[in-house]
Amino acid sequence: MEASRLKKITALWIVIVLVLFVVSISLGIIMRLNQGEVLHLSPITFYSDMTVHGLTMIGIWFVAGMAAVNYVMERYVPTGKGANVFALICTVIGVLMLWASAFIGHFHAGWTFLYPLPFRIAWAAWATPLFLFSLSVLTLGWLVWTLSMMTALLRKYSFTQVFAWQHFRNKNPEKETPPFVLISMITLVGILTCLIAAVVLLVLLFAEFYSHGTFVNDALLMKNLTYFFGHTIANEMLYLGLAVIYELFAEVSGRPKWKTTWYVAIAWNLSLVFILTAFFHHLYMDFVQPEGLQIVGQLASYLASLPAAGVTVFSIFIAVYRNKLNWNLTNMLFFIGVAGWVVGGLGAVIDATISNNFVLHNTLWVPGHFHTYNALGNVLFSLGFFQWFSLQYAKNPVNSRSSGLMLTLLVLGGIGFLAAFYFGGADSIPRRYSNYPDELAAGKTLAIIGGAFASIYLLGILIFFVKVSKRCFGILFSRS
Amino acid sequence: MQHSLLILFLALAAAAIAVFIWVFSSSRRASAEQSGMKSPLQKRLWFILILTVVLGIFASVTLPKSPYYLFANETPAAVVHVAARQFSFLLSQKAIDPEHPEGEDSIVLPANKLVEFRVTSLDVNHGFAIYSPSNQLIAQTQAMPGYVNRLRWKFTTPGTYHVFCLEFCGMAHQIMRTSFTVK
């Protein structure tokens, strides 16, 4: 009964994520076409779309990781179904509130909602509190889920075991911590920390909003808190996806299960430190930020790539290189996703170098690199899970021809769409412009190219959506 | 500089994709008896070591070039006060009073001499990004309410330099701009 409930909740998560993904990609394409002057939206409509696009995308791929980790975690510990459902309800309500604030109230402060922009009201007066309450609902739902998962893990594993510290010295410890458990716990700690930052940020925003001018926040502190929350949660959603890859890649490929070794344990423990301090790179151009923190930002951003490349990516290479694998859509999505993650990481490391950021900050280079490790990285991790999950209960055989077509569309569309961002960044085209000035007219052509390739990517997603959601509806309405 | 970074990125990305394709094709060609990579731990540790050294070199070369250290020991020949607000910039060679903010109609700066921009905001966060006469972004800082960011730069080419706001600041963000002349 419990297993059946989890199965249905997971299927519902997947359908919701895919529907919201299609809507959000469409908003993105509309934005690119407007920048290319194929469409002519008012700037307010453009920036409202931009706000919804950014926040919905971060939200859905975070919850996609949550749903996947929750489903797989049941193999190791019993998880709280109530917390899972609560997170799902909060996510749906939160997204609807966000959409209402932006689409009806015309709130358009961007996903970063950098203080004090939400208070310079250029939209319906109710849209700002509704936006802040929407973030509060999302934070509450995700916080409850995170605490529930951590509690579930700590019931079975001791504090040191859940972080695999016994693996540091002992090659064959008495109690082994599976990599999936270790990575999930590391990620959950990161999520908890950034959600606490979100709570502090929201409390400060509410305090100023309802104080009617008697309480004023500090802009630098608020910016630090915003990026500690925003950057970290966007990073953690990737790590949720990686936890699933550690668990499933070998399994779906017909290879022996991955084990935690001393270097896996050390790498993941260290990565927690790097993930939590890399966000400083968002404030490089705020010269009043203490220089020490700026340097920490660059070093942490560099160091984060060591465990990622040296442990996770190298483990994928070891698993694949000269090994006969049972290749299928699931592990192809994982494998291509890891490649996309690496390429996006290269773009990120270049931008995380302070002297480069001086000429790349807030140009199209920035959406270039983070769309790379989302659209061709993290999204593929989650799609791999969706495919694997839905096939567990499928009655129909897999159509490999449509799988090949889908992958081709995703990769081809993704590369073209991303290239337009990188070339735009190198041409100093600003991000978050509804229209480009004549001096930067190259941005218009690149936007049309980007929009056209994003449409090809969307086509691939639609093929996947039809196939997987059909299976998921079958699961949702099945009796068992 | 940006185009060099693009070439570096494209080269690294192409190399990474080539490795992934090579690893993938080795698996497609593999027979059931083949046993994967030989001495993987040794190779992994070498890979991490090389990556650490490369990143260490990158960090030690690039950190001293950070904008906070640019011309730090020199005295500026000209100071420009910048107050950003939705959706315009005020530029003045005299200090700007936030209660009665006023800018100068035209700013002319000397070529090949150090200029310091003291950048703040009167409302929300803005960007202060300087574009060369050939429309390349050459230097930037943020304009933050309650703080003054000091950006130092030497302009080598005479001409008209445009300034664009590079931090999203509201509905007319895309038209927030100004310019100055370097002679």
Image (cartoon, coloured by chain):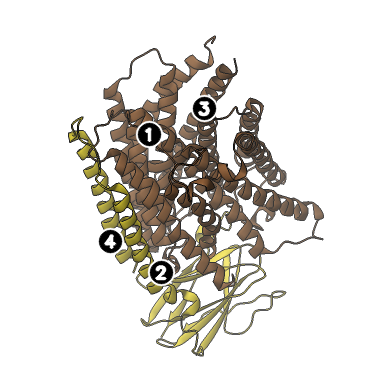
Chain colours: A brown, B yellow
Q: Position of residue A462 (x, y in %)?
A: 39, 28
Res. B137 visible in picture? yes
Question: Quarter holding the C terminus of chain A?
Answer: top right
Instruction: Say the numbered circle drawn on residue A249.
Output: 1
Task: Measure the alpha-carbon separation of dots 4 and 2.
Answer: 19 Å
Residue with the mark numbered 4: B7
Residue with the mark numbered 3: A75
- Disc 4 marks which amino acid? Ile
Q: Position of residue B95 (x, y in %)?
A: 63, 82
- Snapshot quadrant of residue B49: bottom left
Residue with the mark numbered 2: B59
Mark closer to the observer (1, 3): 3
- Disc 1 marks which amino acid? Phe
- Disc 3 marks which amino acid? Arg
Q: Secondary structure at mark 2?
A: helix
Task: Measure the alpha-carbon separation of dots 4 and 3.
Answer: 46 Å
